[in-house]
Amino acid sequence: MEERKPQVPIKRWRFCLFCVFFVTLVFIARLWWLQIYRGEQFGEKAQSKCLRAIVTRAPRGQILDRNGKVLATNEPSFTIALFPAEFSTDGADPEEICQIINIPRAILDNAVSKIKENKVPLFEPIRLVVGADFATVTKVFERSWELPGIIVIEEPCRLYPNGKLAAHLLGHVGAVTEEELKRRKDLELFDWTGKLGLERFYDRQLQGKNGREIVEVDARGAPVRRLKREPAQPGQTLVTTIDADLQRVAEEALKGKRGAVVALNPKSGEVLVMASSPTFDPNWFSKGIKPELWRWLISHKAHPMQNRAISTAHPPGSTFKVVTAVAALLYGKVSPKTRMNCSGGRVVGRRFFRCWRRHGTVDLIKAIGQSCDTYFYSLGLAVGPERLAHIASLMSLGSKSGVDLLGEIKGVLPTPKWKRERYRERWYGGDTANMSIGQGYLSATPMQMALVACAIANDGVVYRPHLVKRRLSPEGKVLDLVKPQVLHRLEAPQFVWDAVKQGMLAAVYGSGGTARLLANLTIKVAGKTGSSEHRKGAKTHAWFIAFAPADDPQIALCVMVEEAGHGGEIAVPIAKQILQAFAQKLQNQ
């Protein structure tokens, strides 16, 4: 008997045909949506998957000391960035991205919001981690499938090979701010700029010009070949006037203290040393400073980021007596042989102004060498405050020096008019007496007092201090050579300068001199100590100014240590270490 095949119900056939038709229709609709409706957009995205355009950051120009020693340079580093053209929140877990590259979620969210708000170019990488370690970079490459749009870029990172050395004058770099972008058209969104010191003052010269690269990458985002390249142009090289060896000696001598050292070449204004303590390491900023470290820096009571050489002003104490001496000699109120008796002070008005000890009968030379207050009370009162202020201004007090750094202050050079305008009070004889010994309203920076030492050493001629000796192109061609520029010129008979120099020599080599500690150096030094009072109950600020060799000055310096004691006990030993190192350099030339 023949077996009959089962019949498929016609309804089931119709249902199957409908399903096939429906699925086909869905595929056709989807293809139309992908190829036609969204074809152009996905075409661009597909192209961006194989071609990547990246801005290559220009290396900043190097900063060298006067002898060619590197103070600031660059090192290759890895940057982990988000590439907007390839990033999609649909294909990535933000928490996992942050965990792999070890960043707070807020950094990634901020970058994503910029993409959504069209605040960044499609092909401009948004840097998430600057200076990533090798382990993190390896993880990014190994898990690239889970990190769409997260790329690794090799680019230069600022390096200060000597750590904290010369930090205040070098400064540091940081990410560009919105304000800087508005102010400067030469900057791009993710550039790094100078924030302090020479890095900031010469930022345009150091910046260089960014390059562009178009790279073909595979599906994992790894580079396959470079299709087009516009190389970045490095910034200019700065050759500074700083002597790194002397700078190191000064900073070691200041360690553990609050103060500053400035040393200049009095014949040119070249800054040989500019040290400030406490200090910081500019490398902390090169890869983005950690928040806890930044909080420590800005909240530290000693203000380690403040350049005390130019940004703090205190009464200069007895170092100012050389100014009073110049004024008195110039206006004929005293001669080098004029003698006065010091019995421990003198009466001014209704007050008795003390001297720090009884000096007996002294002339001008001994008065400078032994720092007799009584003698200079009389000189200041004889000259008068206006003339005293005028001579001080011609010796660089009361105004900015014009050194090539930002943040310099001008201190205070008081006059009767200044006091009336500031305090609405009249000027008294006691104000003049205080001013004549570097106290009262008078205040000066270590830079200004170093220039006073230059004025004495150079017979009244003061050159503008400068930190950069010349600028070089990336190829080594000299673009600019800084020439000495006269800042002030005080015309006075030669006997005036000779007398003050003899007094400063007496401070070192004379009987009872306040800087006798320097008498055994191989180089002949002329100096003046100072101890300035600033608030009741606190230790005095220790000051010392000097120049050497005394008969042919090649270095003039100022040492200032805050709330440390007497200048002869605190500042002079620091100066001795610097002058000893300088003398050794002269012998080796």
Image (cartoon, grey):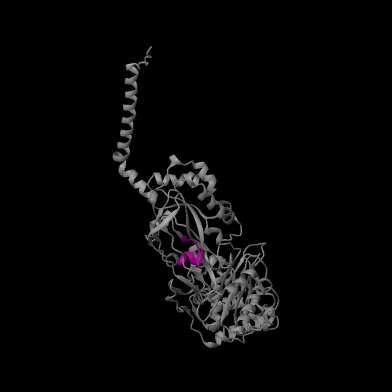
Residue lying furthest top = 1
- Is residue 199 part of the magenta span, yes or no? yes
Residue lying furthest front = 1
Pinpoint residue 481: horizontal percent, then vertical percent.
44, 77
Number of labels in the image equals: 0
Q: Residue at horizontal 32%, vertical 30%?
A: 24
Residue lying furthest left = 36
Q: Quadrant of the N terminus?
A: top left
Query: Is any part of residue 202 visible from this angle?
Result: yes
Image vertical order of residue 417 relative to residue 92, above or below: below
Image vertical order of residue 74 relative to residue 468, above or below: above
Image vertical order of residue 175 relative to residue 246, above or below: above
- Is residue 184 part of the magenta span, yes or no? no
Asked where in the image residue 210 lies, by quadrant, the reply is: bottom left
* In front of the other: 414 or 93: 93
Q: Residue at horizontal 60%, vertical 78%?
A: 546
513 horizontally vs 552: left or right: right
Query: Is any part of residue 103 visible from this angle?
Result: no
* In front of the other: 413 or 28: 28
Pinpoint residue 229: horizontal percent, then vertical percent.
38, 61
490 horizontally vs 123: left or right: right
Pinpoint residue 457: horizontal percent, then vertical percent.
55, 82
20 horizontally vs 412: left or right: left
Q: Residue at horizontal 55%, vertical 83%?
A: 329
Highlighted range, magenta: 193-202
* In front of the other: 72 or 58: 58
Pinpoint residue 434: horizontal percent, then vertical percent.
59, 70
Q: Quadrant of the C terminus?
A: bottom right
